Amino acid sequence: MTEFFQSLGMNYEWAWFVATIAGILLIAFPLMLAVAYVILIDRKVWAAINLRKGPNVVGPFGLLQSFADGLKVFLQETIIPSAANKGIFIIAPIITFTVALAAWAVVPFADGVVLADINVGLLYILAISSLSVYGVVMAGWASNSKYPFFSAMRAAAQMISYEVSIGFILVCVVLWAGSWNLTEIVEAQRGHGFGIVNGFYFNLLLFPMWVVFFISSLAETQRVPFDLTEAESELVAGYQTEYSSMAFALYWLGEYANILLMCALNTLLFFGGWLPPVDWAPLYWVPGIIWFLLKTLFFFFMFSWVMATVPRYRYDQLMRLGWKIFLPMSLIFVFVISGYLMATGHFGNPA
Amino acid sequence: MIQAIAFYLFATMVIASGVLTIMSRNPVHSVLWLILAFFNAAGLMVLLGAEFIAMLLVVVYVGAVAVLFLFVVMMLDVDMAELRAGFIKNFPLGIAIALVLLAELVLGIGALGAGPLELGTASGANAPNLANSNIENIGALLYSKYIFVFEAAGLILLVAMIGAIVLTHRDLKTTRGHQNITKQVRRNPKEATQMKQPTVGEGVEL
């Protein structure tokens, strides 16, 4: 895009600057629109599983429901509790929202369609997602109320625990792909299974890692069955109990943007990103971004499917699953996979 | 131009948040300013072209260490007046640490003036290979030239980790009910319930 702005007569630095801003807007606005509709899809899927109709009043088939909700929230009064720590109370939802958007900078939507094609793309996502815990912890502390505080403590422990095993799973994928760059990771999946299947999921060593990654991403985004931070039967509404109006909406949008990011990561790391499922020429006629969005939506469907069918975990079970099952399992797989790759000469001759 | 703006932005933010870390009255605010300082230091690393170090700084310090730090500070009810009372007592120690840091800075700047440190690549040639990415260069160095130092660091961390677990581990079986999860999962209605036909006026013997 920089070349385009340079052709308009700008020098390189300005062209780069304007192109980056345009790129950010081109990602952020469709993402917000996607979040609005994904919330609708979420509610429709739960409704269908519960044999209800779901939102169907605002607009045809309830298509405008999310916008009506947004408007309602926008018109509400912003309440800041008098005992709250005001500065941090206001900054916390802003951090959650910003962090949820920032991670999308390195996500490749199609071949070459990426804002920042950096070497350490996957590490960047790991770094940014480790920041998202601050929005929750700060909200819980600044609210100066006991239920949000409990929720913040739970969230911090939960997210740190599951990030550890997510880190090891990423190492497995990176070992096989030989790069931390997301574009190269996707390209490494071309024809990976039997020379025709695009994606790592057909690999017997990586498939269990995908299962662990999927469950960990549920825990990382605090979705059911791991939504202990918002457990409404115990903690009112968790860390967002004291929030109202737009501050509440920012949490809402940030949460769903994070969920979409995790779906996109599932797609990019294990299911071949923008590549069609099978390495067959006619399938490449469909633009890559369509494949990417379809796969991401499929994972989102799985997220809401889980939400509608699985009951909530107990907190000690959650910790047990993270530390005593997922962590050793992913650690063993890092050993097994690197051993396999060394034995089969995947890395070429070591110098 | 953009690099210069970014550098001065990050540098000012690092210094300002560093100062505010010490100046804040509320310890939680201090930790949050410290996190901002880490984050901007990561930005400076990116400007240097050390993107791997920058990401590690965010993942390790901001994402893990500072969260635990924040956790502890939030849980403890720190009384600032009591902390301030110790100011005079700890003053000599603080001055000593400050002097050591100053000496290190002077030494570091002096050493830099004497010429760059020559680090080797895997093949034994000096000077890093700029054609490869950060991660490849660091990996090639860590796993060839510095392999023993690297392994030793890993071993020390392992010992420290085991030590921490041993120190805090308590056998919970003696203090409260211990759950056997496989036993709980194995339980089914057939084993867990039994039919009784008590006659009127008599209880059930279990």
Image (tube, coloured by chain):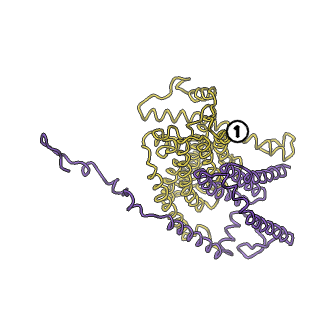
Please state the chain letter of the residue tagged with numbered disc 1 in the rendered image: A
Specify whether residue A87 is in view.
yes
Foreground of the two, A320 or A328: A320
What x and y, as percent, mark residue A286? 60, 42
| Residue identified by numbered label 1 | A26
Q: Is residue A160 left or right of residue B112?
A: left
Q: Is residue A310 left or right of residue A276?
A: left
Look at the image and give the colour of chain A.
yellow
What x and y, as percent, mark residue B96? 76, 67
Mark 1 neighbour class, 10 Å CA radius: few under 14, some 14 to 19, many 20 or more: few
Specify whether residue A186 is in view.
no
Look at the image and give the colour of chain B.
purple
Identify the residue at image location x=80%, y=44%.
Answer: A17
Q: Circle 1 sits in a helix, a strand or a loop, which is it?
A: helix
The number of numbered discs placed on residues in the rendered structure image is 1
Identify the residue at image location x=52%, y=51%.
Answer: A216
Foreground of the two, B151 or B14: B14
Going by the numbered disc 1, the residue's amino acid type is Leu
Residue B134 sits in quarter: bottom right
